[in-house]
Amino acid sequence: MFSVEDVRHILDARSKKDGLNAEQIGTIVAKAYSPKSLVIPNPPTEDSSTTRRSDQQSLMLNTQQKVTIGSTKYYGVAVLEIRAEGARRYLAPVTCYHATEAKKRRIFK
């Protein structure tokens, strides 16, 4: 479930870091959270091939539908974190971004 803070974080991060507008960000989020997306473990960072960034994180990556921004095609990616409240465990949104083909290949290494 998304909170207002989750949505605000995605909007702020993508507009400030990437210069995207609200429509582009909305498209990225829609593609990332598509039923066609795969849920996979968060892969290791480039400087460490043996440990994941967080053993409590997963990625949702839509490998079937690309997002076009400008003239470049990207994949929608959502970062999810495993959280617990009492006995309840759930995936909570962390952020959402667009990834290049090269980034997609690194994720699947």
Image (spheres, grey):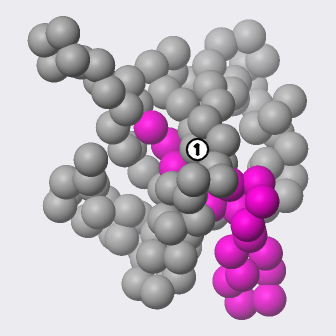
Choose top left, top right, bottom left or bottom right for residue 60: top right
Mark 1 lies on residue = 60
Q: Residue at x 86, y 44 (%)?
A: 105
Q: Residue at x 48, y 65 (%)?
A: 29
Horizontally, is 74 left or right of 42 in the view? right
Q: Can the viewer see residue 77 in this picture?
A: no
The relative height of residue 2 versus residue 46 in the rendered view (above or below) is below
Q: Residue at x 16, y 19 (%)?
A: 85
Name, please, the residue furthest toward the left.
Answer: 86
Residue range (magenta): 62-80
Percent position of residue 12, x then y: 34, 69
Assess whether residue 71 is covered by the magenta stretch.
yes
The relative height of residue 33 versus residue 14 in the rendered view (above or below) is above
Q: Nearer the viewer, residue 53 or 94?
A: 94
Question: Secondary structure beneath disc 1?
Answer: strand
Percent position of residue 66, x then y: 74, 70
The relative height of residue 60 versus residue 52 in the rendered view (above or below) is below
At label 1, the amino acid type is: Met
Pick the quarter of the image with the C terminus.
Answer: top right
Assess whether residue 70 is covered by the magenta stretch.
yes
Q: Main secondary structure of the magenta part?
A: strand
